[in-house]
Image (cartoon, grey):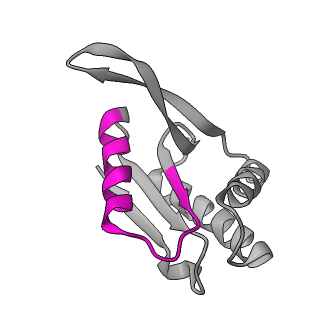
């Protein structure tokens, strides 16, 4: 079982590989599918567009929301391909962490000139 530090190192490595291959300017879906390949090549368990049931006051609603990626059932990855990340993107990921009771998420914007500064770690 990977520790969070080791796991996020592997995830970041996969993100860099995808970014170095494609660069900026593509649709989010291309980055998502490519990142799944990279993560699986590293031997990691990845769930894509994972459906999460939604409850309101302990009543299950007739709708779900979807996580972009869930890695090793520990880390949520929220992918973007936008001009700039906004505060609402960070808050969205924090809400996902709270609702799923996960500790760690990574917000990634592939539409950037510098991927190093476009990976944001959010902890719950």
Q: Is residue 68 magenta?
A: no
Q: Is residue 92 magenta?
A: yes
Q: Is residue 26 left or right of residue 68?
A: right
Q: Depth check: give the residue in front, 83 or 55.
A: 83
Give how far across and how far down residue 102 sits, in percent.
37, 40
Q: Nearer the viewer, residue 79 or 16?
A: 79
Is residue 20 rendered to the left or right of residue 102? right
Q: Nearer the viewer, residue 4 or 86?
A: 86
Identified at 46% across, 53% down, the residue is 4
- Which residue lies at the image location 31% right of the left edge and 45% below the top edge? 95
Q: Position of residue 38 (x, y in %)?
A: 75, 57
Residue 105, placed above or below residue 21: above
77 to the left or right of 37: left
Which residue corresponds to the image point at 69% horizontal and 63% vertical from the top-left?
Answer: 27
**Magenta stretch?**
77-99
Location of residue 115 in the rendering, given as x and y in whole percent from the top left corner: 57, 79
User: From this viewpoint, which residue is outermost toward the top?
Assistant: 59
The total of numbered circles placed on residues is 0
Single out the residue that lies furthest toward the bottom.
113
In which quarter of the view is residue 1 placed? top right
Residue 29 lies, with reference to residue 67, above or below; the image says below
Q: Which quadrant of the figure has residue 87? A: bottom left
Residue 110, position in %: x, y? 61, 71
Q: Is residue 89 above or below residue 104?
A: below
Near-viewer residue (10 or 22):
22
Identified at 29% across, 40% down, the residue is: 98
């Amino acid at each position: 079982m990977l520790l969070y530090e080791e796991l996020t190192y592997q995830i970041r490595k996969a993100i860099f590989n995808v970014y170095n291959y494609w660069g900026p300017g593509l649709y989010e879906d291309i980055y998502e599918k490519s990142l799944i390949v990279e993560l699986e090549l590293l031997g990691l368990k990845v769930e894509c567009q994972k459906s999460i049931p939604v409850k309101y006051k302990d009543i299950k609603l007739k709708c779900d929301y979807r996580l972009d990626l869930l890695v090793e059932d520990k880390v949520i990855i929220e992918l973007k391909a936008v001009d700039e990340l906004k505060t609402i993107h960070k808050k969205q990921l924090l809400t996902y962490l709270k609702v799923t009771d996960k500790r760690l998420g990574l917000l990634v914007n592939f539409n950037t000139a510098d991927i190093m500064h476009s990976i944001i770690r959010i902890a719950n």
